[in-house]
Image (cartoon, rainbow, N blue to C red):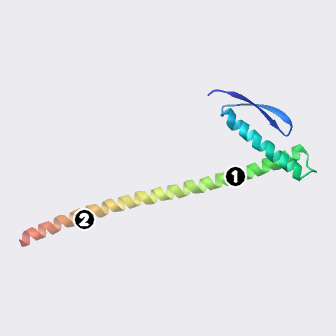
Amino acid sequence: MEKNKVRLNIGGADYTITTEDDPKYVMALGDELDSLLTRTLRENSRLSVTQAAILLALDYADQCKKAETSADNLRSQIKEYLEDSARSKMDAEIARREVERLTRELQNAQGKLG
């Protein structure tokens, strides 16, 4: 993949990031982080930039863990649904075969009576 250099300004400091991601995406992340950092510093004037960055990192780590847990739960549910679907298909196939067998028996019995 192509490496992109993206210049960001976060909390008044300039950063150059080398990434394979779309530069617009990385810039949007940087803008969002800068906005959150600025707001955090404005709302908590006693915090240093480093303290505010740590709080934001903890918040992002929390969101990430919760998203991973949610994704794991969704994968588990999907797996259960797929297993249920496979069982239902198998049950439907068994029922179809039984209907065919009973239909043949009924036709044989009607042939003997007729």
- Between 30 and 96, which is closer to the camera in this rendering? 30
Q: In the rendered view of the protein, which quadrant contains the C terminus?
A: bottom left
Residue highlighted by disc 2: 99
- Between 79 and 49, which is closer to the camera in this rendering? 49
Q: Is residue 113 left or right of residue 42?
A: left
Q: For the residue labelled by badge 2, is the local secondary structure a helix, a strand or a loop?
A: helix
Q: In the rendered view of the protein, which quadrant contains the N terminus?
A: top right
Which residue appears farthest toward the bottom when viewing the image? 113
- Between 80 and 12, which is closer to the camera in this rendering? 12
Q: Position of residue 113 (x, y in %)?
A: 7, 73
CB atoms of marks 1 and 2 within 8 Å: no
Q: Residue type at mark 1? A: Lys
Task: Using the rendered view, name the quadrant where residue 19 is placed.
Answer: top right
- Where is 14 relative to 105, above or below? above
Q: Position of residue 49 (x, y in %)?
A: 88, 43
Name the residue: 28% across, 62% down: 96
Q: Earlier in the sequence, mark 1 or mark 2?
A: 1
Name the residue: 83% across, 33% down: 14
Task: Using the rendered view, name the quadrant where residue 104 is placed.
Answer: bottom left
Q: For the residue labelled by badge 1, is the local secondary structure a helix, a strand or a loop?
A: helix
Within 10 angstroms of label 1, few (less than 14), some, or many (20 or more) residues?
few
Q: Is residue 70 left or right of residue 28?
A: left
Q: Which mark is residue 65?
A: 1
Q: CA distance from mark 1 to mark 2?
A: 51 Å
